[in-house]
Image: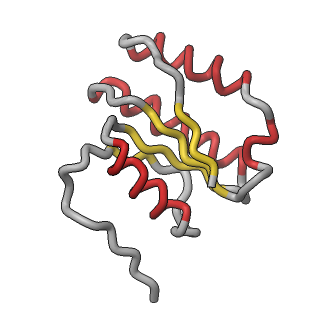
Amino acid sequence: MNAVAVPPLPKEPLAAAGAFYDWWRSLDAHLLAADDHMTLIFAPADHTHRAWRRAAVAEWARAAAPARVNAVAGDDPAALARVAQWLAAAPGVTGQLFDCDGVGAGEAVLLRG
C-alpha cells in the first residue's frame, strides 16, 4: 500500500481543488506501480471541501482501475493509520473518502462472506 500525504491546500474550496489537481498532475505515473492500492491523506477541512474531495478521489480511482485509490482526512495519526491499513485489506473498496477523528465507533471490522 502506498500512503501519500496531500500537501497543504488553501482554505477556500475552489482554490483548494485547483491546487489539488495541479499537485495530482505533477505526480509521477508510477505511484501506483509498486502496489495495487493508494491511500491519499488529506488534512482536516470543513464541510465545504467534502464534495470536491469525493469527486477527485472517485475520478482518480476510475482512472487508476484496476488499482484502487481511496482517501482519508484527519489529523489523528493513529486513526489515519488504522483506516489506511483497513483499506489496504479491503479489496472491494475504491474511490472512497473517509473522515477520521480518532473518536469514532471503535475498531473497524471487516466482514467476509
Q: Residue at x 28, y 67 (%)?
A: 107
Question: Which corner quadrant of the image does residue 43 belong to?
Answer: top left
Question: Observer-nearest residue: 73 or 50?
Answer: 73
Q: Residue at x 53, y 49 (%)?
A: 70
Farthest-out residue, front = 78
Quadrant including the N terminus: bottom right
Residue 9: x and y, percent? 46, 17
96 in relation to 92, above or below: above
Q: Is residue 45 left or right of residue 88?
A: left
Residue 76: x and y, percent? 31, 41
Residue 30: x and y, percent? 81, 41
Question: Which corner quadrant of the image does residue 25 belong to?
Answer: top right
56 in relation to 109, above or below: above
57 in relation to 38, above or below: above
Q: Is residue 64 left or right of residue 20?
A: right
Q: Residue at x 45, y 84 (%)?
A: 112
Q: Residue at x 39, y 47 (%)?
A: 80
State how many labels appear. Answer: 0
Question: Observer-nearest residue: 9 or 78?
Answer: 78
Quadrant including the C terminus: bottom left
Residue 82: x and y, percent? 39, 57
Colour pattern: secondary structure
